[in-house]
Image (tube, helix red, strand yellow):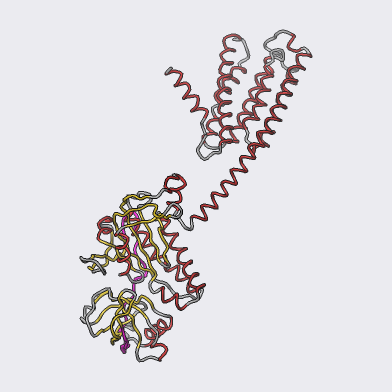
Amino acid sequence: MAILRTVNNAFWKIANIGVTTDLRPEDKKHILYLNLGALLLCIITLYSFFQVLVYIPSTSVVIPVALISTSVLSLLVYVFQRSGRYTTAGVYFFLLYYAMALVHYPLNGKEVGAHYFLFPVITFAFFVFPVKKKKWMFSVIALGLITYATIIILYACLEPIAQVDPFAIQLHYQINIHGIFATFILMMFTGRNLTEKTENSLMEEREKVAEMTALLKKMFGRYLSTEVMNTIIDDPTALELGGERRSVTIMMTDLRGFTYLAERFEPEQVVEMLNAYFEVMVEVVLKYNGTINEIIGDALLVLFGAPQEMHDRAQRAIACAIEMQNAMAAVNRQNRAQGLPELEMGIGLNESEVVVGNIGSSKRSKYAVVGSGVNMASRIESYTVGGQILISESVRRAVGGILRIDYQREVLPKGAETPLKIFEVGGIGGEYNLTLEGKEPDLATLARSLPLEYAILEGKDVGGEGQGGRIVRLSKNCAEIALNVSFKPMTNLKMNLRGVDAQLSLTDFYGKIVAQSEEDGHHYIVRFTSIPSEIGAYFQAVLQFAVIPKRNGATS
């Protein structure tokens, strides 16, 4: 039994040479037929070779050489099959057999009847070539008939090496043989046509299913992440309600000052800006295999490590965040070309254990993430300014020493009992080797400070009376502001210019205190989070004409 199992396994290994998982079932069967044909050709020619040596030792050396050569060369069929050259393998098989027949059969003699072996080989072409290779099938059949006719002609010119009963060349015997062959090939042709119709029907149905699948993937791919969609396709039980605990890296992104922009532009322009922004950002997220869990207005909630496990999720998340920030340059180039304002994005990252899964009801559910870690990522992101990436201590520990940390500080989020340590990321080494581009230029000292009025923002609300201050140094997106009271870093301010025309003085702009000046305790570095175009134009004019020049001619 062990021998039979070994033989059976070897047989099917040979039969399946060249068969790959991406092939359609109807194509696989044609490959299997050819593999079996090559195996039979090898066995039959080897058997004939030994028969000639034993029973006809005085035969011409041409015949045993032709037989052994055919047996060896038939193995090339498997080489072509393995390399995926299926048509080449089929055509080669028939050419090899026809060449051997032209050398071998005429020398045997018409009376032996060896030339009749061409008949089943010719009809074998119906099995070897698939529907889409019909031209090759008819070509090898035609070449086989020509070969058969050539052998019959050669019988008149060559002396056979063996003679048998004259009955073999009688007319009625020849009519029967050729009649049987003609009937058989006609039946094969009819069967082939029926098979083609079935295969064509199957192909059409398969194409329709493929088109529908592609359409569904395209449709639902807009609403579900690729990972979630593939998980559902591979395992329909993934649709069942329920969740599991999973350690993930959570990314929260948000556009700075976008609420203000949305109020000043037409809805169509707002949607255009968002679509252009998300087009670039989503592409970067997918590049790093992040799962886009939600798009909330202008914000993204992205998971690394769910639904698929990801051992390097924290590294991937930070590399993704850096590339997203760097890609904002391309987004803003497109905005400028279309006359739209530039955008700035903040990114917060947190590593935490959460519950992920299908949440909702049997009629409507979504793949969601639940846990305090999500809220923490959102809080970390709220401390960012445009172009900044802030991470939690858990992310820093998960990534290790390949991070470039530009600064760290402790903050006390609203509702938290203990301070939270956050870190600003400037780059990551290792296999990703990425750094943030376009860092803030140096602040220029103004020849005359700009007076302003400010109020403290508590969440989305403005608190306290308007108080006075002045801008003493300025850059495109940042300023050093002298304030009359002490503030903690990460305080959000709403500001208005004073000493300008009435319309400009009524225009609000926003910023976040990111640091305290080392030179003066009441001077603070404020990163602008939302600047209307008219305020931005005013600042550009100030930077161009109202700064103190350095001795070498550069601005200070």
Q: Quadrant of the image for the C terminus?
A: bottom left
Vertical arrangement, residue 482 with respect to residue 395, above or below = below
**With 540 as the anchor, is 421 left or right in this view?**
left
Tell me the residue at 72%/15% (across/down): 110
The image quadrant that residue 293 belongs to is bottom left
The image quadrant that residue 394 belongs to is bottom left
Rendering coords of residue 229 (x, y %): 45, 51
Rendering coords of residue 190 (x, y %): 71, 30
Rendering coords of residue 296 (x, y %): 41, 65
Front-lying residue, 524 or 47: 524
Residue farthest to the right?
171
**With 132 as the anchor, is 343 left or right in this view?**
left
Rendering coords of residue 109 (x, y %): 70, 14
Tell me the residue at 29%/63% (across/down): 376
Front-lying residue, 130 or 97: 130
Front-lying residue, 88 or 377: 377
Q: Is residue 129 in sight in this rendering?
A: yes
- Magenta stretch holds residue 210: no
Q: Which residues are magenta?
A: 428-454
